[in-house]
Image (cartoon, rainbow, N blue to C red):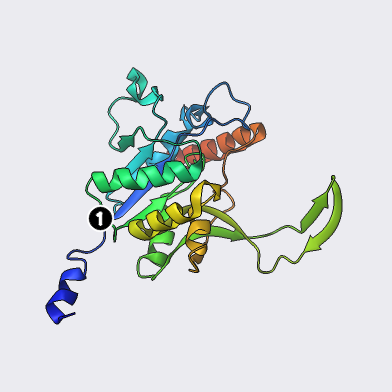
Amino acid sequence: MTELDDIALKPSAAPRCWALIPCAGTGSRAGAAGPKQYQMLAGQPMVMHTLAAFAEVPRIDQTLLVVSPDDHFFKSPQAKNYSFLIAYCGGSTRAASAFNGLNALLSEGAVRHDWVLVHDAARCLVTPEQINQLLDACISDEVGGLLALPLPDTLKVAHGHRVVGTLPRPDKWLAQTPQMFRIGSLLEALELAGDGVTDESSAIEAMGLAPRLVVGSAQNFKVTYPEDFALAQAVLQSRQTSIHQRLCT
């Protein structure tokens, strides 16, 4: 390979940062009447709080929401005037939706060396500060990384609802999102890992790589069960009250 060939293979522009939000889940564990990402919280559908956080991060060039092919929410009058992209290519699993979404990003002008931050639609309490914290930690990293929390509780192993062991916790972390990797690397990793992985980091790890752990926040939890809605509602209302008080002083 000549020096000119080597130069031609290098990216010609600084990598951009995209956000990818899989939003095709049915929310079966949430006990809601429909998909949980569209349930109302603090005056808005849950996913709109998620999207608002990314909209406040200037380094995110564009956000793509991946919904199921038969999703009509964003075609309704209440969902007009949005500034993000929508791809109707959601799959039956989180991994399939992410994989399809990555290909949709490429069709929208992304390139394989760009960064993508994949985030759960139901982690509606993420803040712009947390997103920027991940960007700061991973933008120069060779692999990428994810927000996570050191495990605070004792971890038990069970069999038949009986404890059969206790695991040491000093090296255990709770994975969160966003998870930030190069589009090309993540596409390859998800294709090799298949639908069994439940997050992007797992697919990257299966390639023998070690993503960076970036300390997140306990408030960045995933709304999953019925009782989670009340907690998320309380946090969002508290934030709105704080903003209102600051504006009034």
The quarter of the image holding the N terminus is: bottom left
For the residue carrying disc 1, how many other residues have a C-alpha within 10 Å: few (<14), some (14-19), or many (20+)? some
Image vertical order of residue 222 relative to residue 163, above or below: above
In front here: 79 or 210? 210
The residue at the far top in this view is 77
Closest to the observer: 184 or 129?
Answer: 184
Q: Quadrant of residue 97?
A: top left
- List x then y, in percent, for residue 133: 43, 61
Q: State the image coordinates of residue 96 (x, y, percent, origin top left).
A: 45, 43
In this picture, residue 219 sits left or right of residue 82: right
Q: Could you say whether the residue bearing mark 1 is in a helix, strand or loop?
A: loop
Query: Residue drawn at (41%, 34%), measured in percent from left and top?
Result: 48
Q: Residue at x 35, y 19 (%)?
A: 76
Q: Is residue 210 left or right of residue 100?
A: right
Q: Is residue 131 above or below residue 211?
A: above
Where residue 139 appears, as percent x and y from the top left, is 35, 65
Q: Residue at x 49, y 36 (%)?
A: 92
